[in-house]
Image (cartoon, rainbow, N blue to C red):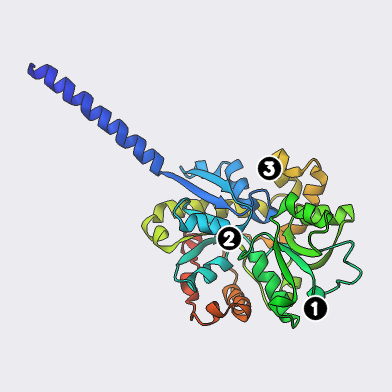
């Protein structure tokens, strides 16, 4: 082989290797986030950010997956299948008590955005959490945030865990069906399901945690909920990617506070409306007060969450939780 042929061959090999390397880099650059029910309004910032093009504006390739129960989304992250979870901040505290460190890097909601709905059939006799005794209560999944909050309300009402039955029924249409089919007497869900049940007369609101004031009354303070949480180790080793994610989400939170519910709804997939856009807009209007305006963790919020979990979770109470490791404001502070 002459020198020219050898050089050309080596150049081709180098180009092929570079192409393979580039392909690997591109694949590695995809960030996959698991959302605890992507059509739930409490997690709307995830899909809205994607649809507004803010991930792409930051040069990110973000893939959103949906898992109806937040606890299952959490498990996917712990297994390494996804890089982060759009879910409730309280999982960061619960997981630390189990020796696993994850942190909220941007906070979407200052309150749960959850509603305890009583079936129309049970509403005559079920008028407060004290009436949970002997009842079957729906949650999205065992170990989910809806499970945590339900247990706390029952505990505060003087009930023990065995006084009532917790039934995992998922969210959205499966929750609605559980009310319709009398599988549960009451349950905790989010919009748009909550508004749909009330509008149809099939359910009544028992506890509304979509607004700061009633939430503080029930839980003792603001209860930061929907967030993007990720393993601390991944955050530390992927600082630039996390900063870009937070930049995109902070931009979305500002968008949500400068546009009407109808304008926001216009950005969402039409199948999220459930065939009734006006009802979806109404549900969105009811939930908008739950969201932060800038992605920042509310002051004293983490302490409220810790206090709530500690009342009925001995493992959390005994763990000496370091709240500073469960969230960070550094990326929000540095956001564009």
Residue occupying image coordinates x 48% and y 71%: 98
Return the residue nearer the eye: 259 or 35. 35
- Asked if residue 227 can be seen in this view, the reply is no
- Quick one: SS at disc 3? loop
As displayed, is residue 202 above or below residue 65? below
Q: Could you say where residue 227 lies in the image, as x and y percent from the top left? A: 57, 60
The answer to whether mark 3 and mark 2 are in CB contact below 8 A is no
Residue extending farthest to the left is 2
- Quick one: SS at disc 2? helix
Return the residue nearer the eye: 313 or 109. 313
Q: Could you say where residue 86 lies in the image, as x and y percent from the top left? A: 57, 55
How many tags in the picture? 3
Whole-angstrom CA distance, mark 2 to mark 1, is 26 Å
Whole-angstrom CA distance, mark 3 to mark 2, is 25 Å
Mark 2 / mark 1, whichever is N-terminal? 2
Residue occupying image coordinates x 47% and y 44%: 60
The residue identified by callout 3 is 268
Between marks 3 and 1 in the image, the one whose residue lies nearer the viewer: 1
Q: Could you say where residue 222 lies in the image, as x and y percent from the top left? A: 66, 72
Residue 71, disc:
2
Task: Give the image quarter of residue 290.
Answer: bottom right
- Quick one: SS at disc 1? helix
As displayed, is residue 255 above or below residue 271? below
The residue identified by callout 1 is 130
Residue 198, disc:
none
Q: How many neighbours does mark 3 have within 10 angstroms: few (below 14), some (14-19), or many (20 or more)?
A: some
Mark 3 / mark 2, whichever is N-terminal? 2
- Asked if residue 124 can be seen in this view, the reply is yes
Mark 3 / mark 1, whichever is N-terminal? 1
Return the residue nearer the eye: 203 or 219. 203
Whole-angstrom CA distance, mark 3 to mark 1, is 38 Å
């Amino acid at each position: 082989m002459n020198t020219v042929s050898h050089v050309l061959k080596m150049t081709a090999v180098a180009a092929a290797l570079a192409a393979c390397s580039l392909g690997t880099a591109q694949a590695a650059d995809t960030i996959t986030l698991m959302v605890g029910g992507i059509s739930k309004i409490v997690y709307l910032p995830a899909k809205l950010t994607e649809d507004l093009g803010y991930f792409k504006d930051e040069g990110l390739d973000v893939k959103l997956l949906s898992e109806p129960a937040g606890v299952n989304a959490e498990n996917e992250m712990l297994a390494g299948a996804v890089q982060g979870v759009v879910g409730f901040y309280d999982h960061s505290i619960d997981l630390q008590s189990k020796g696993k460190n994850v942190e909220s890097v941007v906070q979407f909601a200052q309150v749960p955005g959850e509603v305890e709905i009583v079936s129309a059939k049970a509403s005559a006799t079920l008028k407060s959490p004290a009436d949970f005794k002997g009842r079957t209560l729906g949650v999205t999944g065992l170990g989910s945030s809806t499970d945590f909050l339900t247990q706390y309300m029952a505990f505060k009402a003087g009930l023990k865990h065995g006084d009532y039955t917790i039934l995992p029924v998922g969210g959205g249409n499966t929750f609605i069906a559980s009310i319709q089919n009398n599988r549960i007497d009451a349950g905790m869900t989010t919009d748009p399901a909550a508004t749909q049940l009330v509008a149809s007369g099939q359910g009544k609101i028992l506890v509304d945690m979509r607004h700061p004031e009633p939430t503080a009354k029930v839980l003792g303070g603001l209860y930061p909920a929907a967030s993007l949480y990720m393993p601390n180790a991944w955050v530390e080793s992927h600082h630039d990617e996390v900063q870009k994610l937070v930049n995109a989400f902070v931009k979305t939170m500002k968008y949500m506070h400068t546009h009407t519910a109808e304008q926001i709804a216009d950005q969402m997939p039409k199948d999220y409306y459930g065939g009734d856009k006006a009802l979806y807009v109404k549900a969105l209007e009811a939930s908008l007060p739950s969201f932060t305006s800038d992605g920042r963790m509310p002051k004293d919020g983490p302490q409220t969450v810790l206090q709530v979990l500690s009342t009925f979770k001995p493992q959390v109470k005994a763990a000496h939780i370091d709240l500073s490791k469960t969230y960070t404001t550094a990326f929000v502070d540095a956001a564009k």
